[in-house]
Image (spheres, rainbow, N blue to C red):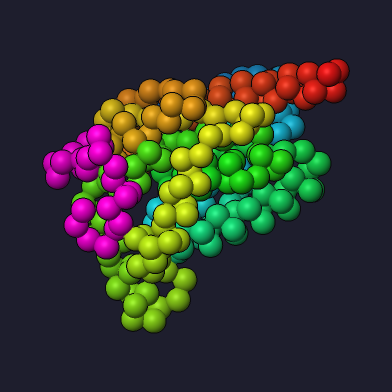
């Protein structure tokens, strides 16, 4: 593997998307347009609906949205708004820019989940886009006491190195800036050393019983090898969007909402079983 990434992050059977594959990301424009049209239709429908019928039933599980590589919470703001309209109680991850050490990001996210779980008195569901989904997958292994379910979107858990060369160049730049003394960025240890190995190994471990898992992927993904996103332990859902567009396309948001509702039901059933056992 070229660049600074460890070779173990690209196992046999997976490959980087071809150079021209990134052109598929151009569909982000119509995907964003689809979101705008959906919001306008919903606004019109609300105006025509009596006030008592406008409020969606509340889902009590907290839902934390985690952004992808180079991204911050703002990239999932539109999805969060749509999920709230569906009755979900959403929370930000408090990640301003996902550019630092993965283990540090996971530790920060873990503290955030602890705070929310303690405040709400219940476990949390986590929705992660790309790298955010990989963080969620690892934390689900480590803290099933905090997490009741995860939904990943375009997250190459099986081969984190199976991404477009443009991302590799971004990682290389972060590593060079880290070497130059800029704090808070991925270092070489984070992408090729013990730190990277620990994060990767944790994300390969079985998802604990009692934690639901949905993996959303797209064969049109121009950033990562879609096969790396299809974790055999998760409920697989195929969509037809770009990698970036998964965060805003209303069709994907619908799948996320459906998965969250289904996983909440599964969690309640498991709790009932444990209480009656």
Q: Give the overall secondary structure of the magenta segment.
A: loop
The question of residue 28 being in magenta is answered with no
Q: Nearer the viewer, residue 142 or 75?
A: 142
Determine whether 12 is above or below 277 in the image. below
Figure quadrant of the C terminus: top right
**Going by the image, does 199 lie left or right of 270?**
left
Residue 256: x %, y % from top left: 52, 29
**Number of labelled discs?**
0
Magenta stretch: includes residue 22: yes
Residue 207 position (above or below residue 251): below
Viewer-side residue, 15 vs 223? 15
Whether residue 27 is visible here, answered yes or no, is: no
**Residue farthest to the right?**
276
Q: Which residues are magenta?
A: 1-24
Depth check, front residue: 205 or 247: 205
User: Is residue 58 toward the left or the right of residue 18 in the image?
Assistant: right
């Amino acid at each position: 593997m070229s660049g600074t990434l460890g070779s173990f992050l690209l196992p046999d059977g997976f490959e980087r998307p071809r150079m021209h594959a990134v052109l598929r990301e151009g569909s982000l424009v119509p995907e964003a347009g689809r979101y705008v049209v959906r919001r306008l239709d919903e606004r019109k429908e609300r105006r025509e609906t009596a006030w008592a019928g406008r409020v969606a039933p509340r889902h009590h599980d907290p839902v934390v949205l985690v952004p992808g590589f180079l991204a911050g919470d703002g990239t999932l703001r539109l999805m969060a708004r749509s999920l709230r309209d569906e009755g979900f109680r959403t929370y930000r991850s408090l990640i301003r820019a996902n550019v630092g050490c993965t283990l540090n990001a996971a530790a920060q996210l873990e503290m955030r989940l602890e705070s929310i779980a303690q405040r709400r008195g219940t476990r949390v569901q986590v929705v992660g886009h790309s790298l955010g989904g990989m963080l969620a997958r690892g934390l689900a292994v480590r803290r099933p006491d905090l997490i009741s379910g995860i939904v990943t979107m375009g997250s190459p858990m099986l081969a984190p190195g199976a991404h477009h060369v443009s991302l590799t160049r971004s990682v290389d730049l972060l590593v060079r800036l880290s070497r130059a003394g800029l704090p808070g960025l991925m270092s070489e240890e984070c992408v090729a050393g013990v730190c990277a190995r620990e994060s990767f190994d944790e994300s390969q471990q079985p998802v604990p019983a009692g934690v639901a898992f949905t993996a959303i992927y797209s064969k049109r993904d121009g950033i990562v090898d879609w096969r790396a996103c299809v974790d055999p332990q998760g409920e697989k859902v195929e969509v037809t969007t770009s990698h970036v567009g998964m965060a805003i396309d209303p069709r994907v948001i619908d799948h996320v909402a459906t998965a969250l509702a289904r996983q909440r039901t599964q969690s309640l059933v498991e709790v009932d079983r444990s209480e009656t056992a």
